[in-house]
Image (tube, helix red, strand yellow):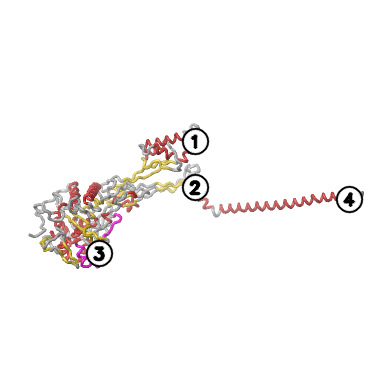
Amino acid sequence: MSRQPNQERSARARRIRQPAVENGLRSESFVFRHRAGNAVVFIVLMVAVGQLFNLQVPKAAGLRAQAASQLKVTDVEKAVRGAIVDRNNAKLAFTIEARALTFQPVKIQKQLAEAKAKTPEAPDPDRRLRDIAAEVALRLNNKPDATTVLKKLSGNDSFVYLARAVDPAIADAITTKFPEVGSERQDLRQYPGGSLAANIVGGIDWDGHGLLGLEESLDASLAGSDGSVTYDRGSDGVVIPGSYRNRHDAVDGSTVMLTLDDDIQFYVQQQVQQAKELSGAKNLSAVVLDAKTGEVLAMSNDNTFNPSQDIGRQGDRELGNLAVSSPYEPGSVNKIVTAASLIEYGLSTPDEVLQVPGEIDMGGVTIHDAWEHGVMPYTTTGVFGKSSNVGTLMLAQRIGPDRYADMLGKFGLGQRTGVELPGESAGLVPPIEQWSGSTFANLPIGQGLSMTLLQMTSMYQTIANDGVRMPPRIIKSTIAPDGSRTDEPRPDGVRVVSPQTAQTVRQMLRATVQRDPRGEQQGTGPAAAVDGYQISGKTGTAQQINPGCGCYYDNVYWITFAGMAPTDDPRYVVGIMADNPQHTADGQHGTTMAPLFHNITAWLLQRENVPLSPDPGPPLTLQAA
């Protein structure tokens, strides 16, 4: 009986101790979890503080700039490219402002659908697109047609061009009626003459910058400077008032005035193409210079290109300017150097009679005339009128290499003319220290040196201008956007021979076009004559080099002609070069370019109503009785 109470007390004690232990364990677990939670919170806070510090200190400047850039907008104002005009202000190239119509199909389709879903009265999306297509086609005279436009409007592209080269007024009318259509400025370069003077003017690339010709070499002056303005735009796309800054106005390009006359250029270009086709030449070029100033009035190649079309798709069209970039051996037109030297140094007279054999040995080579003959009593005038190689070399020996080399330099050979056209070649005159006896047997007859057509024409301009060579130029002036005009500086003339020498040589070169009283040919180029006018000039034939052997072909030639008109008071100088023609310039038997010279010169004299030449008196004596 006495144990039971004790057992009960022990059980109660155990029951009391058990909750206390459990409570202690729970308390320790709670403390542990509390501390762990605090540690986690502390770590998170430290990470957050680190991130805030990183954002507010090291990255602060960059983030501010990034935020500003998200608001900042810079619009570019395109400068208008300057025009290229001829000497009479006729436009050869100019820029017009147009518009390209743009559209965002995916975005606009979504907007139209959402608007219709919110407002039943809103336009039906499909109907709206059809209306836009119809309006664009109507305004653009069905180019493109409505079906084509609608296909673009309904497509899955994010951006499309609906039409390009749209008149600004038409574009404004379309975008006003249909704001969904965008309008983007698009400058268009226009060449109203098509291929007229294309080898001089050149063309532009897809980005509007010069690619060829003067468009390339004068790109900085023609292009001008684009303008710009910076402003801020809110998240809703609205410009923030007062945010405009850094405004720079566009400066349009300058207009470049050339020395060309577009009427002369058109006629010469037409005649060159016709002569090329009739003669069968590989290519053909012509240059017309003002006799007094050396200004280029016309310069033409055959087979020229049209800069209004994609330059990359011109096929076999000639993109270069052969008259300044492609030197050749000139043949007998170079005999003007010998003729001028003889008279200048008093080594012969026009009527001196020389006994000219059919061939001559000089420097280890034998030189023949183009026709077989025995010893002939040619006058000095006759040597050049009949283009006797043998007679020319006989006379050149009196001059000697030193004086001859000096005269070549005075005439501008072996050096660029500085005409301001890209790709100009200096030609090639071998240095005198490299000359051999055979060199001096070739140079006076126009072989063994090379020149461009412009250089050749400039030589004859020297004689036409009483012995003063005026380096040819093609840029007359530059006109700034504000209208102020700056004339291109002109280089000083180079005195080559005296006025008396030049006048004498001009008279001697009349022999080239002379016929005898019976109408029989005496000089080598009577087809160059123009009724009523005294004409002075020289034909040329030069063998081309065979690259396979480094020797001359026997049947491949450069055919040239250079002359001036009228002889008594020259106004024009014309130079012509043909690459291996099979016929004359008018398609007849032979290979002279005299007929082309006649056509160009006769047209020029008649166009300007140049007074007829005075009676020159008796025919020149080419051969003694």
Q: Which residue, given by chain and number where applicable, does mark 4 sit on?
A: 6
Mark 4, Cα crowd under 10 Å, few <14 / some 14-19 / many 20+, is few
The amino acid type found where label 1 is placed reads Ala
The amino acid type found where label 4 is placed reads Asn
Q: Residue at x 78, y 52 (%)?
A: 21
Secondary structure under the numbered disc 2 in the rendered image? helix
Q: What is the spatial separation of the Cα atoms under label 3 and label 4, in whole angstroms?
A: 141 Å
The amino acid type found where label 3 is placed reads Pro
Which of the two residues, 515 or 44, is positioned nearer the viewer here? 515
The percent coordinates of residue 451 (x first, y second) are 24, 59
Q: What is the spatial separation of the Cα atoms under label 2 and label 3, in whole angstroms?
A: 66 Å
- Relative to 96, 582 lies left or right: left
Q: Earlier in the sequence, mark 4 or mark 2?
A: 4
Q: Which residue, given by chain and number where applicable, does mark 3 sit on?
A: 430
Secondary structure under the numbered disc 1 in the rendered image? helix
Q: Which residues are magenta?
A: 420-444
Q: What is the spatial separation of the Cα atoms under label 2 and label 1, in whole angstroms?
A: 28 Å
Q: Earlier in the sequence, mark 3 or mark 1?
A: 1
Above or below, comparing residue 505 to residue 270 in the picture: below
Observer-side mark, 2 or 1, equals 1
- Where residue 70 is drawn, which disc sits there? 2
Location of the C terminus by quadrant is bottom left
Mark 2, Cα crowd under 10 Å, few <14 / some 14-19 / many 20+, is few
Q: Earlier in the sequence, mark 3 or mark 4?
A: 4
The percent coordinates of residue 503 (x first, y second) are 15, 57
Q: Which residue, given by chain and number where applicable, does mark 1 sit on?
A: 115
Observer-side mark, 4 or 2, equals 4
Answer whether residue 221 is magenta in the image. Answer: no
